Image (cartoon, rainbow, N blue to C red):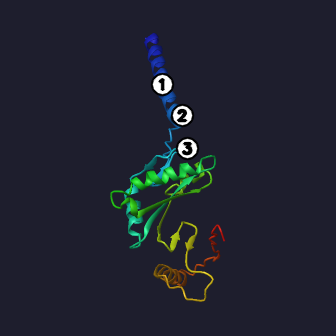
Amino acid sequence: MKKLLAFLTFLLFLLLVWFAWNWYKTNVACCPETVVEVKHGPLYFDCNSDLPITSDAWAKKKSEILSSLVQGEKLLIVGPYFEGESKELGLSRAAKVEKLFLDKLSDDDIELSSRLAGDCEGALDNAVHNTLFASVVRNENVVEHHDKTYVYFKYNTDDPIDQVNVVSYLDNLADELVKSGKTVHLTGSYRCRWRSGL
């Protein structure tokens, strides 16, 4: 009887050790795994790649971009290139993003550009990984970029500016500046055409 009691005590001891070890493993020694999900915006690129990666939020972002286009203007897509990458990679990224819009716009409705956008990894938090989208005026007298605009008109004359494209652009710009309180920096220059044989 003493042997049976000793054996049962030993079994209870082993069972207690087993339960204690399992509790220790799950609650103390081995913390539950924490899964960190990396989230990027609706459009981003892997560093040194021109393949655009879109998330479920891209459809909404694309719709916002298209609805912000002004009638008669073009969609400017400025592809980023990052430190250690080439400007051509930025243009290639812009060209790949353009394809995402060709179901709604024609190739003639889209202009492409590129810009240096800092550190690739640091920019991943940006919703569109530093890709810029803008509605821009592009005609023979006005060429808008993401950071500047060129306005071409007659110079060296006291005549008023009479090009319809220029007047319309400047009127719209003035209205926007009054509404927003923003300012612009104006720089003037002119081109001389030299003819040989004179």
Q: Is residue 197 above or below residue 164?
A: above
Q: Is residue 102 left or right of residue 10?
A: left
Per the model, the C-alpha gap separating discs 1 and 2 is 16 Å
Name the kind of residue labelled 2 in the image: Cys
Q: Which residue is mark 1?
A: 18
Query: Could you say which is closer to the camera, residue 34 or residue 97?
Result: 97
Looking at numbered disc 3 in the image, what kind of residue is underneath it? Asn
Q: Which residue is mark 3?
A: 48
Disc 1 crowd, CA 10 A, few/some/many (<14, 14-19, 20+)? few
Query: Tag 3: Cα neighbours inside 10 Å, few (<14), some, or many (≥20)?
Result: some
Question: How far is disc 3 from disc 2 in space, using C-alphas?
Answer: 38 Å
CA distance for labels 3 and 1: 52 Å
Question: What amino acid is at disc 1?
Answer: Trp
Relative to residue 169, is residue 44 depicted above or below?
A: above
The disc label shown at residue 30, or none: 2
Which corner quadrant holds the N terminus?
Answer: top left
Q: In the rendered view, does 167 fall on the left or right side of 59?
A: right
| Whether residue 151 is visible | yes
- Residue, x 63% and y 74% (percent of image)? 190
Between disc 3 and disc 1, the foreground one is: 3
The local secondary structure at tag 2 comes to loop
Badge 1 or badge 2: first in the primary sequence: 1
Can you tell which of label 1 and label 2 is closer to the viewer? 2
Q: Earlier in the sequence, mark 3 or mark 2?
A: 2
**In front here: 124 or 134?**
134
Identify the mark at residue 178; answer none if there is no mark. Answer: none
| Residue visible at 42% across and 64% down in the picture | 65
Q: How many marks?
A: 3
How crowded is the residue under tag 2: few (<14 C-alpha within 10 Å), some, or many (20+)? few
